[in-house]
Amino acid sequence: MKLVVAITGSSGSVYAKVLLDRLLQLESQWEKVGVVLSDNAILNWELELGTPDFSGYQAKFDFYAKNDFYAPFASGSAKYGTMLVCPCSMGTLARIATGVSNDLVTRAADVIIKERRRLILVTRDTPLSLIHINNMKTVTEAGGIICPASPSFYSKPEGLEAIAATVVDRVLDLSGFELSSYRWGS
C-alpha cells in the first residue's frame, strides 16, 4: 500500500502525531508513506505539541515540501491508493471540493479523486457553516470520505493520545489496515 498523509492547519496536531505513530507500528502493511505539511500545520504542531521536530518520522516516511509538484503522488501514474488529510482544515476542504490545486495537498487530493482512489478527510472544525457542509457533500459525492475528528469514549480512553487514537484507528480501518483496536461488542 502506498499512501499520502497530508497534515493541514486545523487545530488537532495530536491526531496527526498519533496517525504517524500508528503507521510506524503498521509498517509491514505499507510500501511507502508520503507526508506533506502546510505552513499552518507546522505552526500548530509546535504550538500544540511543543516541538517542531519531525526527525523521528523522517527516517521512515518520505516528506515533501508543500509546493513540490514533482512529488510522486502529484501524478496518478505513481499509483498511491489512499490519501489521508489529518487534520483537515475547512480551507483545505474548500479547495479540494472546488478542485483548486494550488499546493501539493490539494493537487494530491485532486489526483486521488480523479483516479477514483480513497480520500479520507479528518475534519476538525466546529461549528460548521452551510458552506462547510456543502463542501463536505461535494467531496462525498466525488467519492471522498469525511471522517470528522469526533472521538468515542465507550472504550474509556485515558489521556489525550488515547482519545485521539479512537479517531485515528477508525481512519486506519477505513483505509484498509488490519489493526488491533477496541471493537464494540467484542
Image: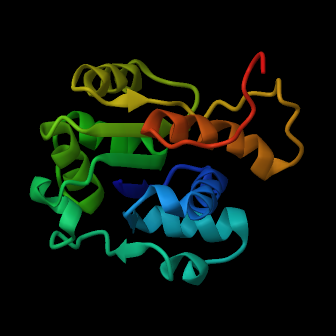
Name the side, left or right, on which 97 lies relative to 10. left
Count the labels in the image: 0
What residue is at 59 percent from the left and 50 percent from the top? Answer: 11
Name the side, left or right, on which 57 lies relative to 98. right
Q: Position of residue 86 (x, y in %)?
A: 49, 48
168 relative to 28, above or below? above
What residue is at 28 percent from the left and 47 percent from the top? Answer: 81
Question: What is the quadrant of residue 35 in the picture?
Answer: bottom left
Q: Position of residue 63 (x, y in %)?
A: 39, 75
Question: What is the quadrant of residue 64 in the picture?
Answer: bottom left
99 relative to 24, above or below? above
18 relative to 149, above or below? below
What residue is at 62 percent from the left and 56 percent from the top? Answer: 22
Name the side, left or right, on which 62 lies relative to 155. left
Identify the colour scheme used: rainbow
Q: Position of residue 141 (x, y in %)?
A: 25, 19
Q: Residue furthest front?
A: 28
What residue is at 67 percent from the left and 67 percent from the top? Answer: 47
Q: Position of residue 95 (x, y in %)?
A: 26, 43
Name the side, left or right, on which 10 lies relative to 45. left
For the C terminus, the image quarter is top right
Residue 156 or residue 125, whichever sits in front:
156
Question: What is the quadrant of residue 14 in the picture?
Answer: bottom right
